[in-house]
């Protein structure tokens, strides 16, 4: 049997009980991708805030010196 799909406003109509698994997988994937996008955006904003804070405190040369000292240990 086929799944009858209506528009997003009307929702999804399932005509076969075996198709519930397919619909649940689709919805789970959507939610997971949405959460992943939100978390990625928050991490990106935090990185930009840290970069701006570093520029304000030490300037470009301070960031470069700190980067090299972190890599070399000196």
Image (cartoon, rainbow, N blue to C red):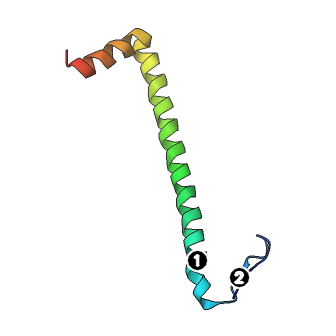
Q: Nearer the viewer, residue 40 or 56?
A: 40
Q: Nearer the viewer, residue 33 or 69?
A: 33
Task: Give yes or no for contact between labels 2 and 1 (Cβ–Cβ under 8 Å).
Answer: yes
Q: Is residue 25 left or right of residue 51?
A: right
Q: Residue at x 53, y 56 (%)?
A: 35
Q: Position of residue 32 (x, y in %)?
A: 52, 61
Q: Is residue 12 left or right of residue 59?
A: right
Q: Residue at x 74, y 76 (%)?
A: 11
**Looking at this rendering, what residue extends furthest in the left direction?**
74
**Looking at this rendering, what residue extends furthest in the top direction?**
61
Dot 2 or dot 1: first in sequence order is 2
Q: Is residue 24 left or right of residue 55?
A: right
Q: Nearer the viewer, residue 70 or 2?
A: 2
Q: Position of residue 20 (x, y in %)?
A: 59, 83
Q: Position of residue 22 (x, y in %)?
A: 58, 77
| Image-quadrant location for residue 71 | top left
How packed mark 1 is, by other alpha carbons closer than 10 Å (few <14, some 14-19, many 20 or more), is: few
Q: Residue at x 43, y 12 (%)?
A: 59
- Which mark is on residue 43? none
Q: Secondary structure at mark 1?
A: helix
Identify the residue position indicated by label 1 in the image.
Answer: 22
| Image-quadrant location for residue 65 | top left
Q: Is residue 4 above or below residue 36?
A: below
How packed mark 2 is, by other alpha carbons closer than 10 Å (few <14, some 14-19, many 20 or more), is: some
**Looking at this rendering, what residue extends furthest in the front direction?**
1
Identify the residue position indicated by label 2 in the image.
Answer: 3
């Amino acid at each position: 049997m086929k799944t009858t799909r209506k528009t997003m406003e009307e929702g999804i109509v399932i005509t076969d009980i075996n198709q519930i698994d397919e619909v649940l997988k689709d919805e789970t994937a959507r939610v997971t991708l949405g959460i992943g996008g939100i978390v990625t955006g928050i991490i990106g904003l935090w990185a930009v805030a840290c970069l701006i804070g570093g520029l304000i405190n030490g300037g470009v040369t301070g960031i470069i010196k700190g980067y090299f000292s972190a890599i070399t240990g000196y």
